[in-house]
Image: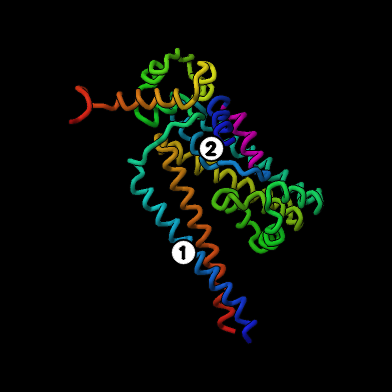
Amino acid sequence: MSEQLLSLVTQYGPPALFGIVGIAAIGVPLPITLLLIVVGSMVSQGAMNIWLALAAASAGSILGDQAGYAIGRFGGTAAVEKLSRVFGKKAGLEAMEAKAHAWGGPGIFLTRWLLSALGPWINLASGTAAYPWHRFLFWDILGECTGAAIYISLGRIFSDRVLALDSVLGDMTWAIGALILALILGWQLWKRLRR
Amino acid sequence: MADNWRPTLAIALAFLLAITGALVFATRATHQARHFRTIDQPIHGWMSIPFIAHTHHVPPSVLFQAIGVQPREPHDHRSVRHIARELNRPVPEVIGDLQKAIDQAKQPPGGPPQ
């Protein structure tokens, strides 16, 4: 499926990019980082306009995120549970809801581009937790535009090393995610040991 | 008393696991970053011919010629998979021809080094 989506982008450009990042933002696991890096490489080869690429990537993701938020906010628990079952993330949703409140805006910002695997679940959780929509929209726009700019620029700079770059970024993201988890657990452990 | 220690022990184990994971992935990322310029770049079915040419530093015309395809003007964005379907050939076979053409184009004049 990833191969077909990537070939859609290389063939049809911004409209395909818009649709794919939008679907991914709702929760379908797709290789969006690789996609944006490939787009950056296409920009450097003159096969795509950079502004169109940035606009399509940002707008598609933002629309998808807003759809996720709306499902959480207005679809009720049943809709969220159904979606969670489809994508196999039910167990983590309550925890995500707590995180959406605890982390607030910076959490939304970081899950748009750095810890992007958590993004769709933060969208749903922000909706169910009734996180204020205008704040969600602000952090969402900021995060998605940042993410699109970073990954498309990296793809543009390292346009002949797309797969290698994706591999490095993938490992770096996991390392950062594990480090954040270690910090949270370390903090919990320290509090418990001090009691 | 023992019950109070169970969650603490679980958190400590999870903490160690997370630290190990962070170290493993950081090491892998560093290793890949070091060999960034030399890591092999395989050809995939989703790639277009100009994209493959760019990543392997060979002229697109060499690759189009290798698979016997006339490029479309001004940009030919057809993927390898798409071209293979048009040529009625298996994708791995087309990829093999492209790889061969890349290897030949990268060989120094006068053949491979002895």
Q: Could you tell me which chain the residue with mark 2 belongs to?
A: A
For residue A166, above or below residue A127:
above
Q: Is residue A123 magenta?
A: no
The quadrant in which residue A58 appears is: top right
For residue A64, above or below residue B46:
below
For residue A94, above or below residue A32:
below
Label 2 element class: helix
Q: Residue at x 29, y 27 (%)?
A: B106
How far across and how far down the image is residue A16, in percent? Answer: 61, 30
- Mark 2: few, some, or many residues within 10 Å (few <14, many ≥20)? many
Q: Residue furthest bottom?
A: B1
Residue at which label 1 appears: B20
The quadrant in which residue B49 appears is: top left
Label 1 element class: helix
Residue span colored magenta: A13-24
Classified by dominant secondary structure, the portion drawn in magenta counts as helix
Q: Is residue A14 magenta?
A: yes
* Callout in the foreground (2, 1): 1
Q: Amino acid at mark 1?
A: Thr
